[in-house]
Image (spheres, rainbow, N blue to C red):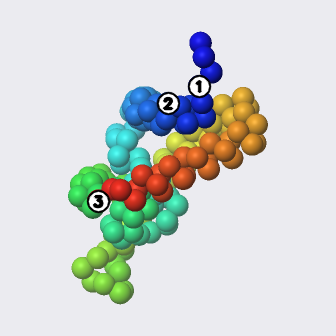
Amino acid sequence: MPQMSLTDQLYTGITLTRPLLRHITARVERDLAGTGVSVGQRALLEALFHLKQATAPMITKHLDVTRQFVGREIKSLLQNGMVETVENPRHRASNFYRLSDESRAMIAAIRAREMREIAEFAKGFTEEDIRGFYKILSTLTAEFSKSSP
């Protein structure tokens, strides 16, 4: 098989992101089985884990998703008692959201397990490999987001 140019390798790598995302989502769904949390909810829980508390627009920006998605997931998480509202002193119509004690413990445990698995997986790569991977994905995300609405 002829060696691919770097441009061809990068293009092929970009085309692999669709099946990769599908496989990651399926894996996360399997790992969440029995928790009562969906993949989308998990993303919001993790965002709030990092942000401590945030408004819906802040979560939307942090995750780079639609406001409708955040609204739907927040509503569900509120109904399940996984997220609490906190009054926003700057804007009465825009509450802050934060994790309940139960969901904070749940997402911390989920993240700890995932980080152990990723640390094990990372042993197959050099620090340079991982830094390059991060640099390319970050740059691609920024580049492609320029053309998004």
Bin the neighbour count of mark 2 within 10 Å (Cα to Cα): few under 14, some 14-19, many 20 and up: few
Tell me which residue sits at (23%, 58%) in the image: 68
The residue wearing badge 3 is 149
- Between marks 3 and 1 in the image, the one whose residue lies nearer the viewer: 1
Q: Which residue is mark 2?
A: 12
> What residue is at 29 percent from the left and 59 percent from the top?
149
Q: Up-down: is 16 above or below 104?
A: above
**Quick check: 13 above or below 79?**
above
Residue located at (72% from left, 33% from top): 125
Q: Position of residue 16 (x, y in %)?
A: 46, 31
> Which amino acid, mark 2?
Thr
The residue labelled by disc 1 is 4
* Of the image marks 3 and 2, the number of the one nearer the N terminus: 2
Q: CA distance from mark 1 to mark 2?
A: 10 Å
- Going 30% across and 84% down the picture, which residue do you hit? 91
On the image, the x and y values in percent for residue 138 come to 55, 52
Residue density around tag 3, few if under 14, some if 14–19, many if 20 or more, within 10 Å: few
Is label 3 in a helix, a strand or a loop? loop
| Dot 3 and dot 2 residues touching (CB under 8 Å) | no
Task: Answer with mark 1 or mark 2, whichever residue precedes in sequence.
Answer: 1
Residue 94, position in %: x, y?
A: 29, 76
